[in-house]
């Protein structure tokens, strides 16, 4: 049986690089320094053949902490306000699928891969979940996983920096339920979040550790329970764990991958990112929210990364989180049926000619 253990030396190297990268990025005032620093330092090492590995379950632990922190923003008053935007949130999710579909046309044209692989490699859902659905549709599992990894790295590298450079500042109406750190309360919150996340994982829900902890923290906050805030040190640790895990996706094998495929992914992802940004601007105009917040809300990046950016910049955290979570749920549940419907319509059109 093949061992799945991670070498301690590779883990130590990745953590050392993560701390150095985070420290350097924080010195030069790059946004999200403790996530982007580890991502780039570990990624650069990995692509150059240095053995690096993340801690088993590290990214999930980081997502759990982020979910706990984000849930504190969903006060009863804010939750009632979000119901007013329900239709826009759902509409934006379906438009995200359309943006991904248009991006897939660019990806296919540049790289030459098949239509199914291009579609599932472009629609902004979770990498693992989209790869599994792609395989069911007869697409290339490995290519879809690569497409999503590169898309996530591209978006996470661009959007936080771009939003920060606009000088965006947050709204005082979106504040967490409590800023008080209570060790016992935090322990209860983390235990509750871990329990719900574990249940979500057992039911096969995508992004279980992020969504489970978010659901647990939201539930407690909406009910008015003030257990504890998540201290800044834990927030930094969460960023390091997530950034380090993302950085380990850079492998020397990227050098041997088809250059046309990588060019196609970058072109297609850039197209999707541009369309998502325009969608964010449109939604901001329709509902009267700030453009930077809505760009984060509609961005085709990871939930944890985009919402963490919103939290640090204080840009409508509940609204950004609601858009991102709803998009993921709709993309995961609707992408495969929509693809099958599209194929049937295309086949019937070819038959009638």
Image (tube, grey):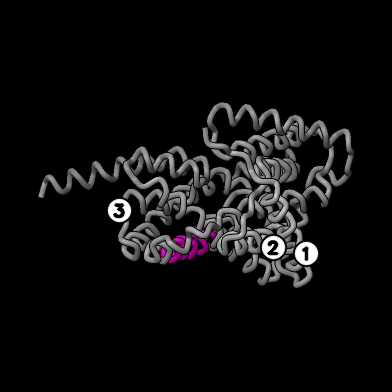
Q: Residues within 10 Å of mark 1 (few under 14, many from 20)?
A: some
In terms of image quadrants, where is residue 15?
bottom right
Pointer 1 residue: 23
**Does residue 138 show up?**
yes
Q: Residue, x 67% and y 39% (percent of image)?
A: 214
The stretch of residues the image draws in magenta is 266-280
Q: Residue, x 26% and y 44% (percent of image)?
A: 343
C-alpha separation, residue under disc 3 versus residue under disc 2: 35 Å
Q: Residue, x 30% and y 61% (percent of image)?
A: 112
Pointer 2 residue: 37
Residue placed most toward the observer, 275 or 340:
340
| Residue 159 x/y as whole percent | 60, 63
Q: Is residue 128 left or right of residue 294?
A: left
Q: Residues within 10 Å of mark 3 (few under 14, many from 20)?
A: some
Q: Which mark is residue 193?
A: none
| Residue 197 x/y as whole percent | 65, 32
Q: Are marks 1 and 2 in contact (CB under 8 Å)?
A: yes
Q: Secondary structure at mark 1?
A: helix
């Amino acid at each position: 049986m093949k061992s799945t253990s991670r070498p301690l030396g590779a883990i130590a190297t990745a953590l050392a690089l993560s701390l150095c990268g985070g420290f350097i990025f924080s010195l030069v005032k790059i946004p999200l320094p403790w996530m982007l620093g580890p991502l780039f330092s570990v990624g650069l090492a990995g692509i150059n053949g240095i053995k690096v590995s993340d801690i088993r379950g590290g990214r999930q632990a980081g997502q759990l902490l982020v979910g706990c922190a984000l849930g504190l923003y969903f006060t009863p008053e804010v939750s009632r306000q979000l119901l007013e935007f329900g239709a826009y949130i759902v509409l934006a999710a379906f438009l995200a699928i359309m943006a991904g579909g248009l991006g897939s046309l660019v990806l296919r044209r540049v790289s030459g891969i098949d239509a199914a692989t291009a579609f599932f490699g472009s629609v902004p859902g979770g990498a693992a979940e989209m790869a599994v659905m792609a395989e069911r549709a007869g697409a290339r599992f490995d290519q879809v996983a690569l497409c999503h990894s590169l898309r996530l790295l591209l978006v996470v590298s661009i959007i936080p920096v771009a939003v920060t450079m606009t000088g965006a500042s947050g709204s005082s109406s979106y504040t967490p339920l409590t800023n008080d750190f209570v060790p016992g309360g935090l322990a209860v919150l983390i235990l509750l979040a871990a329990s719900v996340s574990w249940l979500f994982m057992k039911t096969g829900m995508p992004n279980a550790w992020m969504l489970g902890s978010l659901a647990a923290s939201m539930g407690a906050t909406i009910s008015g329970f003030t257990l504890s805030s998540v201290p800044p040190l834990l927030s930094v640790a969460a960023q390091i764990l997530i950034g380090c895990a993302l950085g380990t996706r850079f492998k020397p094998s990227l050098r041997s991958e088809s250059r046309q495929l990588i060019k196609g992914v970058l072109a297609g992802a850039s197209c999707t990112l541009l369309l998502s940004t325009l969608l964010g601007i449109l939604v901001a105009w329709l509902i009267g929210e700030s453009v930077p917040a809505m760009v984060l809300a509609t961005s085709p990046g990871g939930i944890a990364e985009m919402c963490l950016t919103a939290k640090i910049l204080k840009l409508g955290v509940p609204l950004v989180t609601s858009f991102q979570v709803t998009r993921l749920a709709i993309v995961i549940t609707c992408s495969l049926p929509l693809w099958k419907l599209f194929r049937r319509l295309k086949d019937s059109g070819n038959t009638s000619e």
